[in-house]
Image (cartoon, grey):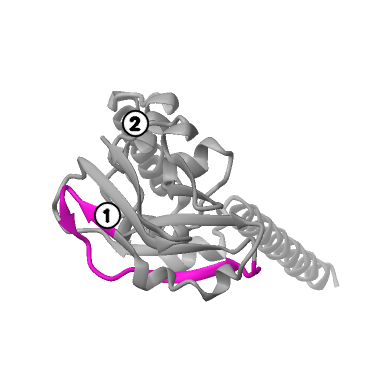
Amino acid sequence: MKKHRSLLFIIFTSTVIVIAVFLSGCGQSKKEVKEVPRVSQEQVNTGGTNAPENSRTGQAGEEKTAATASQPKTNPDQNNQDKSQKPPGNRSPLPGRPSDTRFYERQDFQGGIEVEVIWLTPEYLQALGQKLTPEEEKDLATNFVFNIALTAHSGNLMEFNFSGNTSLKVNGRDAGQGTWEFVYQDFHHPEGMIRFKVPANEPVRELTLSINNLGGVPVREFKWEL
C-alpha cells in the first residue's frame, strides 16, 4: 500500500513540474512577441522603415535650403520697373510727340464757315485723360486720323464731299485717298473723321492736311511740324 502511494506521489510531482515548465515557456514566448517592433503598412509596402527615408528627406531639404540661400535676391521694385520699360506685345514704343493738346488743334474761318481740325494721336487723347483700347491703339498706329468739325449758319454742309476734297501730304508726298466717317450729321454742324494710311518705315517730319473748295475757298491748309 505504501509502495502505491509513493508511486502516485512521484507521478503527481512529475506532472506538476511538467505543467510548471510548460506555463513558464508560454509566458516567455508571449513576452518575446510583445518585444517585436510594429511595422506600419507603408513600411511593408516600401520594404523598409521610415528612418532612412526621413534621413534622405532631411538631407534633400538642407541642400535645397542651401541652394536657395545662395541665389541672389531680386528687388520687386526692379521687376516692376523692368516690366514698365518694355513695350506691350511686339510693338515698338510710340514716337515722341508733344503732350500739349494745343499742338494738335487747328482752326480756320473763311467764307462764312468755321473749320476745326484735330490730329488725333495717343498723346493727345491721353492728355485729355482718355484711356485707349487695343483697337484704338492699332488704329492710331496704322493711320493718320483727323477729326474735322464744321460750323455754318446757312447752307447744307452735308452735301460737301469730304473724302474727295480732303488730302494729306506726309513730308511733302501725297498720302493717297482718305476714308471719311461721319461722327455727327447736321446741315450746319457736321463732324467726322478722315483716315490716311501711315507710310511704312518713314519718320514723320511734316504733315499738311488740305480741304479744297469748301464755302468758295479754294484751299484751306493745316500744318504740323515735328
Vertical relation: 175 (above or below) 124: below
Q: Hey, which quadrant is residue 162 in on the image? A: bottom left
Classify residue 84 as left or right of residue 130. left
Q: Is residue 143 above or below residue 63?
A: below
Q: In the visual, does 84 lie left or right of 12? A: left
The residue closer to the viewer here, 86 or 131, is 131
Residue type pointed to by label 2: Thr
What residue is drawn where x is 37% and y is 31%? 98
Residue drawn at x 42%, y 40% is 104
Q: Which residue type carries mark 1?
A: Asn
Using the rendered image of the protein, determine whether residue 47 is visible from the camera's viewpoint: no
Pick the quarter of the image with the N terminus.
bottom right
Q: CA distance from mark 1 to mark 2?
A: 34 Å
Where's residue 194, x and y in %? Answer: 42, 63
In this picture, is 74 found above or below 150?
A: above
Q: Which residue is mark 2?
A: 68
Q: Residue at x 68, y 64 (%)?
A: 18
Residue named by callout 1:
90
Query: Which is nearer the eye, 61 or 159?
Result: 159
Secondary structure beneath label 1: loop
Indicate the quadrant containing the C terminus: top left, top right, bottom left or bottom right. top left
* Label 1 crowd (10 A; few <14 / some 14-19 / many >=20): few
The image quadrant that residue 224 belongs to is top left
User: Magenta region: which residues?
Assistant: 168-187
- Label 2: few (<14), some (14–19) or many (≥20) C-alpha neighbours in 10 Å: few
Q: Residue 169, percent across and down?
A: 22, 54
Tell me which residue sits at (61%, 67%) in the image.
155
Nearer to me, 220 or 111: 111
